[in-house]
Every structure is written in C-alpha cells, then in structure tokens.
Amino acid sequence: MSAIVAADRSGSGKTTVTLSLLAYLQQKQFNIQSFKIGPDYIDPMFHQFVTQKPCRNLDPILTSEAYIKQCFTDHIQKADYALIEGVMGLFDGVSPLIDHTPTASTAHIAQILNLPLLFVIDCSRLSGSVAAIVNGFTTLNYNLKFAGLILNKVASDRHLELLQEALEPLNIPILGIIRRQDQIHLPERHLGLVPTDELPQLNTLIEQLVKLAENSFNWEKLLPLFQTEKPVKIQPTLTIPCVQHSVKIAIARDQAFSFYYQDNLDILQQLGAELIFWSPLNDSQIPQNIQGFYFGGGFPEMFAKQLSENLSVIKAIRDQISVGIPTYAECGGLMYLCEEIIDFENKSWQMVGVLPTKAFMGKRLKLGYYQATTLQNSPLFPQETTIFGHQFHRSDLTTESPNPVYKMKRYRQNKDNQTITEGWSFANLHASYLHLHWGNNPEIPTRFLQQCSIFQ
C-alpha cells in the first residue's frame, strides 16, 4: 500500500508533513519512492534532496489516468515505502465532475490509484469547528478512504483536548500531532518555495524535520500504511521506439534552469539520447559535439546578471542556433534565448538574443492548464497537433511572436474562453512558455531526437 498526504487547503502544511515523513524514513535507511500530484517542479526537488531518488509527478491532464497507474506501479517495484504529496486542497482541481471530484485534484488521484488519505488540518484557528471540517471532507465523496488525521499547529495541551473532544464522534484516527513552532520554515518567493540548490542550510532543516517526525507521528500505524505492496506490473500502454544512434543532447541544469520532469529525461534516455548536463551560469563553454539543446524552466531572472556576464557561452549558443542545431526551450529557457531579461528592479541584462523580444518581470502570475494546437511545424510537432500543457510564470514579452507556435485556450473552461497564441519557432528552434510532460506523448521527444540525429 501507500498513502497520499492531503489537506483542506493550500498552506495547511502538506509539504512540511510530507518532508518530515520522508526524512524520518530516509534516516531509518528505508528505500523510499515519493510522488507529487500536479505539475509542480519545486516540491519534487525537496523530495529528491531527502530521499536521494527522483520524485515522480502524477498529473492526469498533462499525461493520462493510464499513465499515472503505470508510473506509480513501475516506480514502487523496488521501494520499501511510498508516499504521495497532494496538491492544494483535497478537492481543488480544474472542473468538478459528477462525483464532486475535480480532475487533477488530490481526490482524483486517490480514486485512480485507490489509495488512502492522510489528512492534514491547520488547527491554529480552530477548536470545535474542526469536526465540521473533517466531517465535510470525509463525507463529500464516499469513494475516498481516510486513513487518519494529522493535526498541525496545535497551540497547547488544552487546545489539543478541545480538538480531540470535537473529533472523537467521527471515529477517525489521529495519527499525528504537530505543535505550533517557528523553527522550521521553508522560504518562498514569487513562484513558490525557493529551490533546494539555493538553500545552504537545508541539511539542518532536514535534521529538524527528522526530530519533528520522531516526536509527532504514530509510527506504529503509519509504517504499515506507507509500506508498498508489489502489484503486478502494468503492461505499458505506450511503446517507446529507440533511436538508431546515440544523440548527444546538452541539457542546461543549474540554479537558473532546474525545472525538468524526471520522466522527460528518462524518456530521452530510453529513446537513445546521451544527456549531457551543463551550466550556462558556471561553465565557460558549451559541451562539445552536441546535436541538440534543451533549456528547461527555472529562475533566470534571479541570476540574470551572472548569465549575462558569461559572454563566451552566450556567443556559442547563439552561433550554434544560427547554424540550425535543434533547440527546445520552456519558460525560463525561452527567457534566456530573448535579447534581454528585465528583472524585478527594472534592470536590463543581455541574454542570448536569438528571439527578437525582451522578457520583463510583471506583477501577475500566469498559471493554468492549456489545450494547445500547433500552428506550424517545429522540432517537436507537425502542424495541427493538439497537446496539453501548463503555464507558470511571472514574466511577459515586449514583442509577441509574429508566427506563433500555438493557439491555446484554458483547459475545461466555459465555451466563451478566449483563444490566445504563443510561442516561437523558426529553423530548428521551439521556444514557449508552455511546460510539457512527455509521458503520454513519446512521439514528441522522438521527433526532437530525429531532428537532432541529422545535425552535424
């Protein structure tokens, strides 16, 4: 079995609880596999820092229900324990279905995988009302199974007594009690948590989380809950062809570019790619004899000065793209390929300059799932391909693409939802704000590697 850490709303403590559980299991030297529901990049970095094993994203919009089952089953085969962190509040998702379970919500994944929920509640401003909240969540959808409760931010022994008295008639086990404390804090900024690579004090934080887990949870009941059962492996629903010859792909990965789904990297390798990780921040030259670039998302705006000062790398990238090397860039990668990045202090920094536009930081977060149809051929898609992706950024462009890659509309919104165009494509370059998960579409990286294989 496994369990999903869920909550009544965002900010209730799912990530802190999940990391403390993972840190305790890791400290006991168990083999753990973690998962994160939704399109999140940063929470999985924390999971991986703790477990020393890539976290896997479970997202039915970016992939499919069949892929989620296959991904979960495949990756628990060698694990002793497995744990899934939910997203937002339990029923928060895109649009309500008939059974009151919005698609892409934590509740949706719990039903797909038939797993119990460990329900986290922020009790800081609650006493007797906690029972109404728990009763509402546990009875809205009777297909869901609740293994127990984690009471977070409990102020005192008297506060705990009031909570326990209110919850007793519901007969739901309390498996964890976390006292209110200020020592453990995960720093945030404009796109969520600050990534792990920028937190030198993270080892100390993990030690604090281990102590928290030791003192706060009922491990006698939790360990059997997280212990994996080895189901029969699901026959893959997708066939991944292998490229005939190894293709060398340079993948930008450092503090500025860190948003990659592990499944995307795995699929590239399964297709026959040789992945060469390098740093546009710190390396003095690009990797040699490569046949393609992959620039993921991240925080180039936070490192714009350092990126702009690495002139030899900027020139080398520009030269390679100008002669046609296949290049795929998402979000932060797109920003890096612009002429400039204008940061939050309105300072301008020179970037690669292959896209005739500038990226500037705005005040409004652009967030959501999109259904996109390609308007032209690109290194990733033939024209008129329909895909699903996710946007998550605070920047805009001074000039929109004259020949956009996509026409897009928000996923499962009303019929009057506005269609927008977005993305850049010319020669062998594809750059867009849209993040893609290739798990359900191996033909995307297949086409990219085919383009790369003929580049000399």
Image (tube, rainbow, N blue to C red):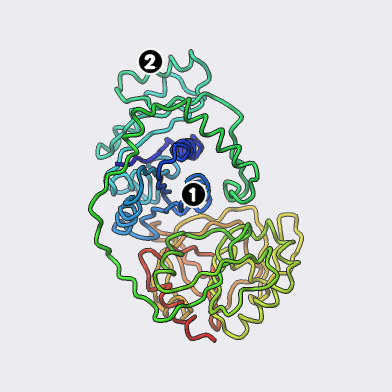
Q: Quadrant of residue 221?
A: top left
Q: Amino acid at mark 1?
A: Gln
Of 230 and 160, nearer the camera is 230
Residue 115's spot in the image, x, y percent? 30, 42
Residue assigned mark 2 = 165
- What secondary structure is marked by label 1? loop
For disc 1, the neighbor class at 10 Å (few under 14, some 14 to 19, many from 20) is: some
Q: Name the residue at 40% across, 60% down.
A: 62
Mark 1 lies on residue: 52
Residue 79 higher or lower than 5, as above or below:
below
Residue 293 in view of the camera: yes
**Picture coordinates of residue 430 (x, y %)?**
53, 75
Location of residue 58 in the rendering, given as x and y in whole percent from the top left corner: 39, 53
Residue 10 seen by the camera? no
Q: Residue furthest front?
A: 29
Question: In the image, 160: left or right of 73?
Answer: right
